[in-house]
Image (spheres, rainbow, N blue to C red):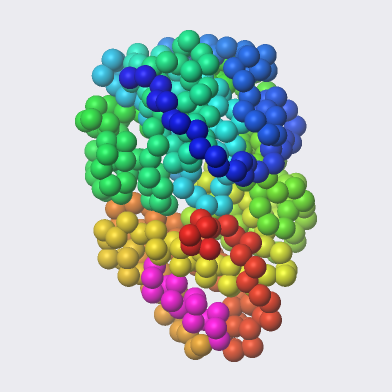
């Protein structure tokens, strides 16, 4: 398999600002307006060091490396489960179907060689040259394909464009897309490491995850763990949006307090994790995935958003709820009917109509955990936490008074759904 030539198109560069808090690694040396060249990449962090599967599993376990695609699954366990051999496949998930997130796009568009390094390290560790990078964002796909052609060690990597859609980034949906099938989850019990692309064992993970694995292999355990916290060494990419001091994508050391990124918020809620995430007060919360999970919060897609006081929070949530309902794969009743019903109730509430809030919450509970993928549960988490976080505003709309503010569209949606 060879690197795919993707003809460039005249698309505007809408890459957000690239920021860093402390020393950058994934984004070391990246310019704001173009991709890092291979020569610049080598000067910034050096060539990737190939490691064995056993070394990579042990190193990932020692630093507690977790996946960056949303589920935060332990990488040591995931890597150890994949049988090595020439038939094994490696699939780099660059779909980033979360509209609020831009971290993966920034990594692919500005530091493509970081992604390629990680893909090569994993492919080498598993003893395979079957490596595919699947991308929905066309500019990112073009940049990755061009970056592969810059280097002699990446000619066997294939870069493929896949369809968009919120559920299209789920592992089984992505495998279907790469195979030319509809990009929908199938809820199958066979995990990709057992039966993935073409029925072969497949290691699938997010582009930032591959970038982290490449860094771990190159730096070694001690140097990798020199940044971050004791509980979670290393760094993470975060998309910051809305009423924050510096909107954009930042690389930050794990363990930082979230209000260091947003500024002091007090009891004002923030969105943590994206559109499958949670509206919550972030006081006392740190960027440590296990710690956040113990507080009932998921880091998810690495989004941290704050709504300004000038927009109607309920209106913002309602817009996203309608989009989430429309993004259902249409396979499972609780998702198809439950999310649409919740979006209608929110719209009615926003307009001042009488809505049974208790009934809405009960129906959200019936949708949670149902279906062939995590979409219903994630959407419910987003909606239900917003009802709690913005209880006063919800009450004002329920009374017919409303909040008196317009809905400004601060929460980003694809242009066709805005």
Would residue 90 be visible to someone looking at this image? yes
Q: Residue at x 57, y 33 (%)?
A: 109
Judged left or right of residue 74, residue 48 is right
Question: What residue range appears in magenta?
Answer: 339-352
Name, please, the residue furthest toward the front. Answer: 10
Choose top left, top right, bottom left or bottom right for residue 212.
top right
* Residue 168, image x, y percentages: 37, 47
Q: Position of residue 225 (x, y in %)?
A: 63, 24
- Is residue 342 inside the magenta stretch? yes
Q: Which one is in front, 233 or 180?
A: 180
**Residue 229 at what x, y percent from top left?**
66, 33
Q: Position of residue 269 (x, y in %)?
A: 66, 62
Of residues 364 and 28, which is closer to you in this image?
28
Position of residue 319 relative to residue 376, above or below, is: below
Above or below, 234 relative to 372:
above
Q: Quadrant of the N terminus?
A: top left
Please report the residue visible at 52 percent of the width from the left and 22 percent of the height from the top.
147
Question: Is residue 128 shown left or right of residue 39?
Answer: left
**Left/right of residue 391 with respect to residue 75 in the rendered view:** right
| Residue 336 against residue 116 in the figure, above or below | below
Q: Is residue 233 magenta?
A: no
Q: Is residue 227 visible?
A: no
The image shows residue 353, relative to residue 213, as above or below, that is below
Instruction: Please name the residue shown 27% across and 31% down the image.
Output: 197
The mark tally for this picture is: 0
Tell me which secondary structure the magenta stretch mostly adopts.
Answer: helix
Residue positioned 67% across, 14% down in the render = 43
The residue lying furthest to the left in this view is 199
């Amino acid at each position: 398999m060879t690197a795919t030539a993707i003809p460039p198109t005249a698309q505007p560069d809408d890459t957000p600002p690239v920021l860093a808090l402390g020393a950058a690694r994934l984004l070391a040396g990246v310019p704001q307006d173009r991709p890092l060249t291979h020569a610049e990449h080598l000067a910034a962090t050096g060539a990737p060091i190939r490691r064995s599967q056993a070394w990579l599993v042990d190193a990932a376990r020692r630093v507690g490396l977790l996946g960056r695609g949303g589920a935060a699954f332990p990488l040591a366990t995931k890597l150890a489960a994949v049988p090595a051999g020439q038939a094994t496949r490696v699939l780099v998930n660059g779909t980033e179907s979360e509209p609020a997130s831009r971290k993966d796009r920034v990594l692919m568009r500005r530091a493509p060689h970081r992604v390629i390094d990680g893909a090569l390290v994993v492919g080498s560790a598993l003893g395979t040259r079957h490596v595919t990078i699947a991308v929905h964002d066309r500019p990112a796909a073009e940049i990755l394909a061009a970056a592969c052609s810059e280097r002699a060690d990446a000619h066997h990597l294939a870069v493929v464009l896949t369809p968009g859609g919120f559920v299209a980034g789920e592992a089984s949906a992505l495998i279907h897309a790469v195979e030319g099938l509809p990009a929908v989850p199938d809820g199958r019990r066979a995990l990709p490491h057992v039966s993935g692309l073409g029925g072969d064992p497949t290691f699938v993970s997010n582009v930032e995850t591959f970038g982290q694995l490449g860094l771990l292999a190159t730096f070694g355990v001690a140097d990798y763990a020199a940044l971050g916290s004791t509980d979670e060494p290393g760094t993470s990419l975060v998309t910051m949006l809305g009423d924050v001091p510096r909107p954009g994508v930042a690389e930050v050391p794990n363990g930082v307090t979230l209000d260091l990124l947003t500024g002091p918020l007090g009891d004002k809620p923030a969105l943590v994790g994206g559109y499958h995430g949670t509206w919550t007060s972030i006081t006392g919360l740190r960027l440590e995935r296990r710690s956040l999970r113990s507080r009932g919060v998921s880091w998810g897609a690495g989004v941290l958003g704050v709504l300004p006081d000038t927009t109607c929070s309920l209106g913002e949530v309602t817009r996203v709820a309608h989009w989430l309902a429309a993004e259902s794969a249409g396979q499972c009743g609780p998702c198809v009917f439950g999310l649409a019903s919740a979006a209608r109730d929110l719209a009615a509430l926003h307009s001042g109509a009488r809505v049974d809030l208790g009934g809405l919450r009960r129906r959200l509970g019936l949708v949670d955990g149902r279906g062939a993928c995590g979409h219903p549960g994630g959407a419910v988490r987003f909606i239900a936490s917003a009802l709690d976080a913005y209880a006063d505003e919800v009450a004002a709309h329920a009374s017919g008074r409303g909040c008196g503010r317009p809905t400004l569209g601060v929460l980003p949606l694809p242009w066709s759904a805005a």
